């Protein structure tokens, strides 16, 4: 636990993100994920405030999540793994492969740029009118750009280019992590019908089986919260947590470490620590019911100033989607039931084996 305490108590010492060449192919030191210094502080602060204002503060977050849940059909998808094994960057074929490898990144970035231009054109034509506070992240960013311009801010970092990078980062981080965790959720629930049964009893008792699960139900659904916690502990989706670069000499666990060293905290090791999580290989949501302090040792979103800024959104998504899937459907494997184990131990993202699942509507 020493490294957890260090990273949370020494934000300046551990606050600089170390980035490899691949992370800066498009970003060039900008954005929210790979930037540092004043740029990072300014854009992270803006993103946190904006996500809060357009999320929990206005109840928009739940509305958007449930809109997606109710609208989207369940389909077989293959998510591009945005985290490439580090060994690739040492390859002699790197330059030749780079264009092909990063095509998905450029495709997403291109879509973001087109979306921004579409909004700018709509504003110019009068089809979209920005309210005083704006209606979304893009509006809020454009308002900030205009404010900096009126205030005479020299070399403002809020430009259309940096808006595209920030949106790109938010999309990459949010899409990959949440979808992978939900994939693990289905694996865990397929293997534990007794958990599904207990969950559904709790949810039907709270909702009467006549309405969806809501974030307002959280105080009355401790088993759902415990199940989501156990899914995140079991998944621990990062094989490698993001690296940071020491800003000065320090001592870690009695070992002197020089400034400039690249370090990380491997959260998955904590989540599988037998001294903390007894029988850690067993999927057991009740562990969080029996020990109220155990949740404090669960850190799927990191710690310190570099922790995931989308934590509130991700928690809401996992709670609502997991809860409503269990309330609305029975889970059935198509073919062999997938094992609760990773099929990708070498890349940065840890994934379960490929599997097919059938969702059968429940008649409450």
Image: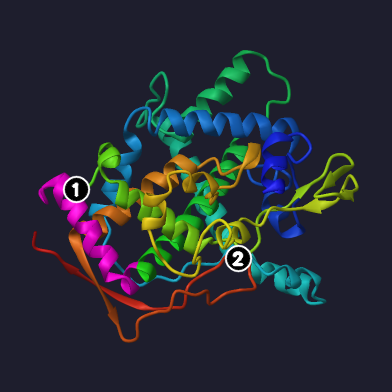
Residue drawn at 65 percent across, 56 percent down: 241
Pick whichever, 313 or 332, lies toward us: 332
Residue drawn at 76 percent across, 57 percent down: 20
Q: Is residue 317 above or below residue 269?
A: above
* SS for callout 1: loop
Sort mark 2 into few (<14), some (14-19) or many (20+) by Cα contacts within 10 Å. Answer: few
Q: Is residue 330 magenta?
A: no
**Magenta region:** 189-211
Which residue in the protein does label 1 denote? 212
Q: Is residue 208 magenta?
A: yes
* SS for callout 2: helix
Question: Is 119 left or right of 20, judged from the image as shown?
Answer: left
Report the predominant secondary structure element of the magenta stretch: helix
Sort mark 1 into few (<14), some (14-19) or many (20+) by Cα contacts within 10 Å. Answer: some
Which residue in the protein does label 2 denote? 103
- Return the x and y of residue 149 as percentages of the image width and height: 62, 19
Residue drawn at 46 percent across, 63 percent down: 180
Distance between the alpha carbons at the discs numbered 2 and 1: 39 Å
Q: Which quarter of the image is occupied by the C terminus?
A: bottom left
Mark sitting earlier along the chain (2/1): 2
Residue drawn at 90 percent across, 42 percent down: 249
């Amino acid at each position: 636990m020493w490294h957890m305490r260090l990273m949370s108590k020494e934000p300046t010492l551990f606050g600089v993100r170390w980035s490899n060449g691949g992370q800066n192919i498009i970003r060039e030191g900008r954005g929210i994920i790979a930037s540092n210094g004043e740029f990072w502080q300014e854009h992270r602060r803006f993103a946190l405030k904006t996500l809060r204002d357009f999320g929990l503060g206005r109840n928009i977050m739940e509305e958007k999540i449930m809109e997606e849940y109710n609208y989207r059909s369940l389909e077989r998808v293959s998510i591009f793994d945005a985290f490439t094994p580090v060994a690739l960057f040492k390859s002699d074929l790197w330059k030749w492969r780079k264009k092909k490898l990063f095509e998905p990144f450029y495709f997403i970035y291109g879509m973001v740029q087109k979306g921004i231009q579409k909004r700018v054109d709509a504003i110019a034509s009068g089809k979209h009118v920005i309210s005083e506070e704006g209606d979304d992240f893009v509006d809020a960013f454009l308002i900030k750009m205009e404010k900096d311009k009126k205030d005479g801010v020299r070399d403002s970092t809020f430009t259309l280019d940096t808006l595209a990078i920030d949106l790109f980062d938010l999309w990459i981080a949010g899409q990959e992590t949440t979808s992978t965790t939900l994939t693990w959720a289905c694996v865990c629930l397929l293997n534990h019908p007794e958990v599904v049964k207990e969950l559904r009893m709790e949810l039907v008792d709270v909702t009467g089986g006549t309405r969806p699960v809501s974030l307002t139900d959280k105080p009355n659904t401790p088993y759902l919260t415990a199940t989501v916690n156990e899914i995140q502990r079991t998944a621990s989706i990062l094989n490698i947590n993001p690296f940071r670069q020491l800003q000065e000499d320090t001592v870690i666990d009695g070992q002197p470490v020089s400034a400039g060293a690249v370090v990380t905290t491997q959260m998955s090791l904590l989540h599988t620590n037998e001294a903390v999580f007894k029988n850690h290989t067993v999927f057991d949501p009740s562990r969080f019911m029996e020990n109220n302090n155990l949740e404090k040792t669960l850190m799927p979103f990191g710690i310190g100033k570099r922790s995931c800024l989308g934590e509130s959104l991700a928690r809401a998504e996992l709670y609502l989607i997991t809860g409503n899937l269990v309330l609305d459907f029975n889970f059935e494997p198509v073919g062999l039931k997938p094992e609760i184990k990773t099929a990708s131990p070498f890349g940065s993202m840890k994934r379960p084996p490929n599997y097919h699942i059938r969702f059968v509507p429940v008649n409450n």
